[in-house]
Amino acid sequence: MELRNQVALLVGAGDAIGAAVARRFALGGYKVCIARRDAAKSDGLIAELKAEGCEVHAFGVDARQESEVQALFARVEDNIGPIEVCLFNAGSNVKKPLLETDAKLFLKSWELACFAGFLVGREAARYMTKRGHGTLLFTGATASMRGSSGFAAFSSAKFGLRAVAQAMARELGPKNIHVAHLVIDAGVDSAAIHARMKAASGIDASKIPPDSLTKTGSIADAYWFVHRQTRDGWSHELDLRPAVEKW
């Protein structure tokens, strides 16, 4: 199958990591499908990549809804092409003191960061196993590895997603489906993180030391590297952090 007929489907593809991965795979020759709750938010990225001669599509989907996830995969497979790569990048990074974390917040965090990942991974596997190949990618975080103060909801969801990815890797690897989980143990160099740092400590983005945040392009390159690995040397889990990050 020629590369130009293959699809990279990115679910939970926002303006930071998701957009960078979309650029990397689109410029690498894939048809790219960007799925997020509000598809219109990707209009600028779509225009940018189409100007580069790439084929890119945007879809609106609530990844917590099984029927919407199933409809998304069917629509992409039937109308655009076979999904060779699927990234689950949705998150729910919320920090709340334990006594302020109500049941609704906890459940919402789990639904978005864990349950939705299960739904997306399962649907990708339905199509990939029929063809006998494919790559499933999951975005993790520091919270995937340890629970910190104020992150009971988020950490539980990211721990759960990591477990889902491991279980999928062990089941699907023998079927030639590469499942990988990327732990981003760092702040991501993005507008959202800049705003959060400004609110928390008054630090302006221009004052942040060089290379102290992980660039979205570096994350996208890591995903591209993992996807391109030969099956005699697959990675399941990679961790990324800047040199100055304490770990």
Image (spheres, rainbow, N blue to C red):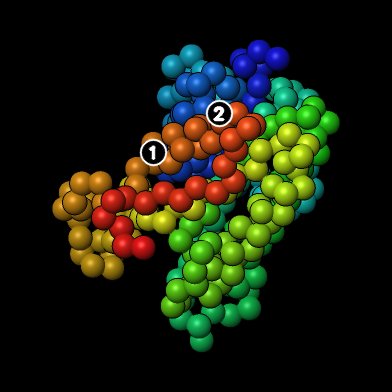
Between 35 and 118, the residue placed more toward the observer is 118
Q: Amino acid at mark 1?
A: Ser
Instruction: Say left or right for 200 vs 73.
Output: left
For numbered disc 2, what is the local secondary structure?
A: loop
**Residue drawn where x is 51% and y is 64% of the image:** 145
Q: Position of residue 43 (x, y in %)?
A: 49, 32
Q: Position of residue 85 (x, y in %)?
A: 63, 33
Q: State which quadrant residue 29 falls in.
A: top right
Between the C-alphas of marks 2 and 1, the distance is 15 Å
Q: How many marks?
A: 2
The residue identified by callout 2 is: 228
Q: Position of residue 102 (x, y in %)?
A: 58, 80
What label sits on residue 218 in the rendered view? Answer: 1
Q: Is residue 67 positioned above or below 145 on the image?
A: above
- Residue placed farthest to the bottom in the image? 99
Q: Report crowding for label 1: few under 14, some 14 to 19, many 20 or more residues within 10 A (C-alpha).
A: some
Is any part of residue 60 visible from this angle?
no
Is any part of residue 79 visible from this angle?
yes
**Residue drawn where x is 66% and y is 52% of the image:** 165
Q: Amino acid at mark 2?
A: Arg
What label sits on residue 38 in the rendered view? Answer: none
For numbered disc 1, what is the local secondary structure?
A: helix
Instruction: Say left or right for 9 vs 96.
Output: right
**Residue drawn where x is 54% and y is 68% of the image:** 155
Quarter of the picture holding the N terminus = top right
Between 220 and 226, the residue placed more toward the observer is 226
- Residue placed farthest to the right in the image? 130
**Circles 2, 1 touching at the beta carbon (< 8 Å):** no
Q: Report crowding for label 2: few under 14, some 14 to 19, many 20 or more residues within 10 A (C-alpha).
A: few
Quarter of the picture holding the C terminus = bottom left
Mark 2 or mark 1, which has the lower sequence index? 1
